[in-house]
Image (tube, grey):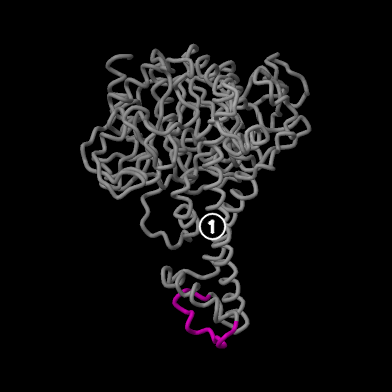
Amino acid sequence: MKIRFVRSCVALFSAALLLVMPLSAQTDAPPKDWFHLNQEVDGYAGVSSKQAYEFLKNKKSRTVVVAVIDSGVDIEHEDLKDVIWVNADEIPGNGIDDDKNGYIDDVNGWNFIGGKDGSQIAQDALEMTRIVAAFGPRFAGKDEKSIDKSDVANYKNYTAAKAVLEEDLAEAQAGLKQYQSIADNLDKVLAAAKSQGIEGIKGSDLESISVEEGSELAEAMPMVKMIGSRNPDVPLAEIRGSLDRALEYFGGQVNFHLNVNFDPRGIVGDNYANSDERYYGNNLVEGPDAFHGTHVAGIIAAVRNNGIGMDGIADNVRIMVLRAVPDGDERDKDVANSIRYAVDNGAQIINMSFGKGFSWDKKVVDDAVAYATSKGVLLVHAAGNESLNVDKEDRFPTKYYATGGSSSTWFNIGAGSWKKSPKQVGGFTNYGKKNVDLFSPGVAIYSTIPDSKYDNAQGTSMAAPAAAGVAAVLMSYYPAMTAQDVIAVLMKSSVKSKEKVTLPGSDKEVKFNSLSKSGGRIDLYRAVQMADKKFN
């Protein structure tokens, strides 16, 4: 699943409340470019790109290809079109696999969740939902004692998935009902205001509406007054518009993500049971909703110093677009094929801003990760947004192979905030002294979105591409650096801190350096200084 908003059961309602809050009500905001800034100089714990480029100004760079496995990217965006990877060996639109790589007209990458006829998967279920749907007929009503020993692992996966699914579905259904009730009540108040000639009514104006005792409007008023009191200066129409986002969120959970009867895979037309199948999909890399992938791509590579929009972190990169992540959980087969495509077509870095709590076919992803590692490709992965200690909770994909061992080119990233301690990490971010390498800017990140627009988003989805952009700068200016070298330098050069921070998902305060392996946050300026001494 795209790691954009919090998805855990515990945070379900708080996530929706964040979605509902109108932008005009959010007054506590950093500079749009804060993730580029320097803590000591500017007061914001960004990646220090200004200082880094001043240090690098007389050095030459090479172009680095960064593959973005995501929901799709708007390749015509004004701030991205000049940095999109182009397959020079493919002739656009001729319907021929010119470079003989198995993919026809793959000019800018590939879409593994589209059909040959140009159709697209927009939504998909979560992996746990698919597991329950697949194994329910076999295991429903049975206990472990009645299961054949060869099937026990599948049974345990099924029962674990079923327990989470039932809890999440109940909360999503309750959330949908709750926010629909709020929306219905707001509609009644807005209609009354309009009929009484009150324009642009705000929370502070509710007393000006005439209310007949015992009417539906009278019943709606207490809830609307409560909402209005929290945002007295915000137009109720704006709040109502924001509610649609909450309804979309919960509706997506109920109708798609947690619906065991929903399966759109037929659109792709592959043999889903065959994990070794590689050549399916289409070349429509934007997809039906490219918000997430476009935002990620902009953080890495939006054209620098062009006077429009915003600046990406890396100044000499090309973005290879690989669409494998729907609104819902990505499928292991598609992730594996995306990794292999990226490696085989020249990517030096792969950004993976997605993750899930269950895996259907871990082996096929393990094999692809091992392949990328053997070819020296850096795999930058978002740690996740469930406020969990991922040293204790499984999240997939992972650098650890089921057969033992792990990838040496895997880089797992937590989300840092622009705020000072104790709020210098995102309240949603996963963490782990063993399994999160370092923290990178991931809160209130302003970047590209489809149709040549820009907006804020937050999550480890944003922290990972910030780290990928930093890594791309190192590989670009210091081509002798391997993926392992990049990881080592970024870990050693990270800004260490023993300050107390709020532990994500709790009120407890812990030392910041207890939340990751490095104990620090990424800093490009420090990294290029260190790299220059060893790899110049």
Quadrant where the image shows the C terminus: top left
10 Å crowding of disc 1: few (<14), some (14-19), many (20+): many
Residue that mark 1 sits on: 175
Taking 504 as reference, is 147 above or below it?
Answer: above
Quadrant where the image shows the N terminus: top right
* Residue drawn at 21 percent across, 37 percent down: 498
Taking 531 as reference, is 44 above or below it?
Answer: below
Residue 60 in picture, x, y percent from top left: 40, 20
* Residue drawn at 46 percent across, 26 percent down: 398
Q: Which of 390 and 18 is in front in this view?
A: 390
Q: Answer with left or right where residue 338 lies relative to residue 315.
A: right
Magenta: main secondary structure equals loop
Taking 331 as reference, is 177 above or below it?
Answer: below
* Residue drawn at 49 percent across, 26 percent down: 317
Residue 523 in picture, x, y percent from top left: 31, 32
Taking 503 as reference, is 204 above or below it?
Answer: below
Q: Which of 373 and 174 is in front in this view?
A: 174
Q: Which amino acid does label 1 sit on?
A: Gly
Residue 535 in picture, x, y percent from top left: 33, 14
Q: Is residue 83 visible?
A: no
Q: Residue 248's image quarter?
A: bottom right
* Residue drawn at 25 percent across, 45 percent down: 509
- Residue numbers of the magenta segment: 201-215
Which element type, helix, strand or loop, lies under badge 1? helix
Q: Residue 342's image quarter?
A: top right
> Is 206 colored magenta in this rendering?
yes
